[in-house]
Image (tube, rainbow, N blue to C red):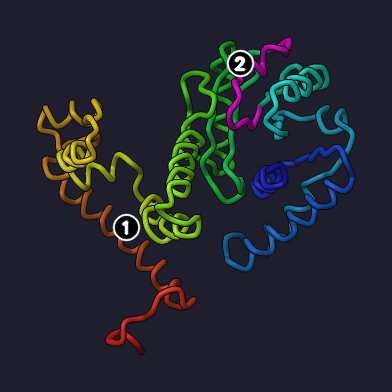
Amino acid sequence: MGWTIALDFALAGCSVTLFNTRAESSARARDNVGRGLALMRTTGLVSDEAAAAAPARIAYTTELAEAVAAQDFLVESIPEDLSLKQQLFRELDRLARPDTILTSNTTALSITAIASVCTRPERVLSVHYYLPAHLIPLVDVLPAESTDPAVIETACQFLEEIGKWPARFKRDAPGSVGPRLQAAMMSEAFKIVQEGVATPEMVDRIITMGIGRRFAITGIFDRLDLAGLDVAAVMSRSRGQPVPPVIAQHVERGELGVKTRQGFYSWDAAAAAALEERMARHLIELLKQDRARGLVRTPEGDAS
């Protein structure tokens, strides 16, 4: 994760120092940065000039004090162990400038617990990236109990400036949203395999060639609006489950989604049509790739 965050900053024009405990880790990170940039360049995501300039903005060190001393914004990305993170944050708190923002890339731990060992918890927050950080725009921003709102605002503005989309949370919520949704899907996948319903390969293909493709364009709630919240209620009952209150409340008010122009979102005909077309174009491109790779056959009537 660390090198992908460093590359993201470097491509945005920031000077970065990447700390590793071992020189071998730094060497691997340097190689990964090179490969990452090569792929971004050959796919046209970045220009040749940007790809050539980025590596010079990343310095590598095995000395924590050297990595920390002159930085405005620090990102910790070590294993998910609270005691390890607290130990590191004690050092960051001691070594960094008083005005430095200290952030953790924690996936599941409380940022309040991490900040509790610092003398300046008001400058500590969670900035959670998604792997690979240089290719996924979403970043979760979660405050500790004592985080200064101005620090949160500064962090969000900085992230927007370097091309990220910060999801700003109002309170400390270990796991935030993305990891919790992923964990729920993984838990159900484990059950499906253990029950003998499907193999791991089948589960993965169902996600990558089915539901996962739609999630790239529509989330849970706009998808429900498109399908109809009354349909979602019927599906819950057919599974012998109670209708979730968040669905039932809309149905009781006659807010069924696109068909009534109001659901979780407000809709007009143009907005619904635009979303459906964007979805169709996305799926068409993926299907063309599948056919080109021989994953699925091209129908005989469509063969050229």
Which quadrant of the structure image shows residue 34? Answer: bottom right
The residue segment tinted magenta is 104-120
> Between 233 and 291, which is closer to the camera in this rendering?
233
Distance from the alpha carbon under mark 2 to that under mark 1: 40 Å
Which quadrant of the structure image shows residue 15? Answer: top right
On residue 278, the disc is 1
Q: Tell me: residue 192, above or below residue 242.
A: below
Residue 282 at what x, y percent from top left?
37, 61
Name the amino acid, label 1.
Answer: Arg
At 28% from the left and 42% from the top, the residue drawn is 222
What main secondary structure does the magenta stretch of the protein show? loop
Q: Tell me: residue 146, above or below residue 42.
A: above
> Between 67 and 191, which is closer to the camera in this rendering?
191
* Crowding at mark 2 (Cα within 10 Å: few <14, some 14-19, many 20+): many
Residue 114 at what x, y percent from top left?
67, 18
N-terminal of the pair, mark 2 or mark 1, is 2
Q: Which residue is mark 2?
A: 112
Look at the image and tell me in which quarter the N terminus lies: top right
